[in-house]
Amino acid sequence: MAPRTIDAAVVQKNSLRVDELLSKLVSLEEQLASLNLQRKFQSSRPHHHQRSRSRSKSRRAATILRDDIASTISDSGRSVSLDRETGCQFLVDSGADVSILPWTKTKGECQASQYKLYAANGTEIPTYGLKILTLDLGLRRPFQWPFIIAKVERGIIGADFLQKFQLLIDLHNRKLIDGVTNLSIKGEVATIQENNDLSTVNRASKYFNLLKLYPDLTKPNLVNRVVKHEVKHHILTTGQPVYSKARQLASDKLKLAKQEFQFMLDNDIIRPSKSQWASPLHLVNKKDGTLRPCGDYRRLNAQTIPDRYPIPRIEDFNHILKDKKYFPR
């Protein structure tokens, strides 16, 4: 029995030595791949003696992004990128309906919302409102988009983000391509095993196929939609135009207000105005903890001519609601 014990100890010692050598070999291969990637990137840069200041800044930013961010692309149509502005790692997933921000990145400043998301297996994922982020992906332009705050471990850039900014995932060349500027981020192959496909509709629902035909019905109303009629609304007033001075906001509220209005400008929800009418901005707290920008239109309403045919009260058509089951908000 003694020789067998010695042999077993020797085998165990040798196996540990082999595991250690394999670990070092994998580490060396990773370092070599990183050096080759950096060499290819530097060799592809044109060498000119005179360069504009803006181009040199852009290239330095791209180099920093390549060194600091592990941007990876997998064979499953997903890529992983880290945003320098937020320090959050995002999974670029064309299979996700919406873009997600982990609730842990909000520092607890969020409240549960009635809006729900669903995983591929039908699991319900709670959400906590919206937050507008401006991402820096190293493509020489900012990407401002409202992300749904949800109880997930990793941020997700979904199909809504990719469609809005015309970003393409090139699996063959391992790239995330900007369809507007033709710039790209080259990545490495990665294996992502967890199922991150998120949907705004429960796949187990019998209405799943029907709702998939009308995706805007189940997504938050984030951007301006095409108007399908030619009806125009006019407010009839009397007297001279009234205006009010801007009210001073706290620094945190001012930052949120600027983000909100910049997003609405970028998505053609609002436009710059030269009107002689001006009403002060008023921010109202939502139930989910975010702010809703409103206008204080009391002075405007005082000069507005009342509508001769106002909207009917619910008491006037209660009899029509008999036996009705669905009452949308």
Image (tube, grey):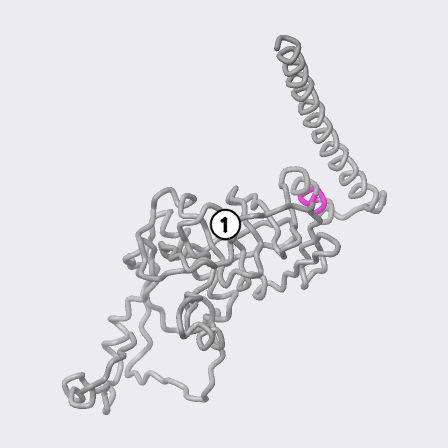
The image quarter containing residue 231 is bottom left
Residue 93 coordinates in the image, percent (x, y) = 57, 56
Chief SS of the magenta region? helix
Quarter of the figure that contains the N terminus: top right
SS for callout 1:
strand
11, 200: nearer the viewer: 11
Residue 301 coordinates in the image, percent (x, y) = 25, 76
324, 175: nearer the viewer: 324
The image quarter containing residue 309 is bottom left
Magenta region, residue range: 57-62
Mark 1 is on which residue type?
A: Gly
Residue 210 coordinates in the image, percent (x, y) = 45, 77
- Left or right of 328 on screen, residue 39: right
Residue farthest toward the top in the current orientation of the protein: 2
Q: Kindly identify which residue carries mark 1.
A: 155
295, 83: nearer the viewer: 83
Q: Is residue 134 above or below residue 327?
A: above
